[in-house]
Amino acid sequence: MSFVTSKEMLLNAQKDGYAVGAFNAENMEMVKAIIQAGEELRAPVMIQTTPSTIQYGGLETYAAIVEVEARKASIPVCLHLDHGSSFDLAVQAMRAGYTSVMIDGSKLEFEENIAVSRKVAEVAAALGIPCEAELGKVGGKEDDLEAEADTNTDPVQAKEFAERTGVTSLAVAIGTAHGFYVGTPVLDKERLSEIRQVVDIPLVLHGASGLTDEDVQDCVKRGICKVNFATELRVAYTKAVRELLAEKPEAYDPKAYGKAGIAAVKELVKGRMRVCGCDGRA
């Protein structure tokens, strides 16, 4: 238990038909909230940071915070680089203590994506660290990257990509988008089922903030083993802080804001863990 890689988490999820919730954290309070939620529900935990979050706080700082909190926990906790933007950043994250990484070459041409993903996967494998990659373009905006249009993952390409790169999990595009949805999302779930039939490694769903519980659960049934949640955690944290300041405008102690944010994020994460079916799996 304690501070681990994502390998066993995702393989267990794949074997037993549930998904691990992967939650983006921006600060110490969100890290505490996510781990507390996992402890209460006995769920495995994946905590993620994006390149812009890392630019804000630093790889070593987030690695230290998560490791310290994880080692106090009785559940498995993993720290994952989300949407790693380059080979160098992925390697830096591994050196800093991250126990799982993603290289996002989805904006590149197919062969270029294979090349950079394989390069990261080889280094990660040598260090015993799992590596996620992405094929196809998930719409919307994630971090500083914005997709102009959705390009769903091709099952035939997905099979070739997984075999040639050696990555241990694959994020697929089936109509989801980063951020909140402007309209009602239309997911190509049959495409997901087709990908599952030809790709053996765990599949990842990005852009889950704003999806219905039913959509997430259906995707899990069709083979998704990891579901990413980011935007809605930020919204929950900020809403709680705003409400506290509206109720107590004289408040000046940041610990008060932090406690409010922790409580809101923890309840949201617990709900998402239940939807993914990872509660009771630690």
Image (tube, rainbow, N blue to C red):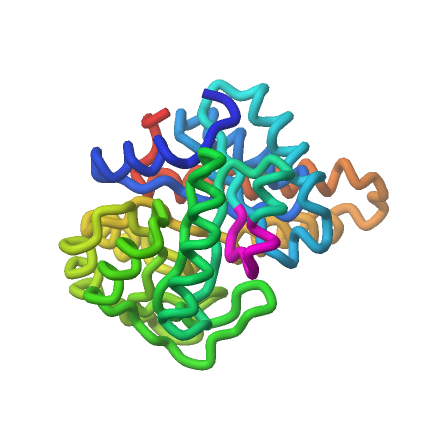
Name the residue rendered at 56%, 59% in the picture.
86
Closest to the observer: 124 or 21?
A: 124
Q: Is residue 201 left or right of residue 34?
A: left
Q: Position of residue 70 (x, y in %)?
A: 56, 26
Position in image of residue 100 (x %, y %)? 48, 41
Percent position (x, y) of residue 103?
48, 56
Q: In terms of depth relative to the viewer, which is nearer, 127 or 223?
A: 127
Give the number of callouts: 0
- Most foreground residue, 259 or 52: 52
Q: Residue furthest bottom?
A: 148
Where 95 sits versus 137, above or below?
above
Q: Residue at x 53, y 64 (%)?
A: 142
Q: Residue at x 46, y 60 (%)?
A: 116
Q: Can residue 83 be found in the magenta stretch? A: yes
Q: Which residues are magenta?
A: 81-90
Q: Quadrant of residue 259?
A: top right
Q: Residue at x 54, y 50 (%)?
A: 233
- Between residue 205 and residue 164, name the one nearer to us: 164
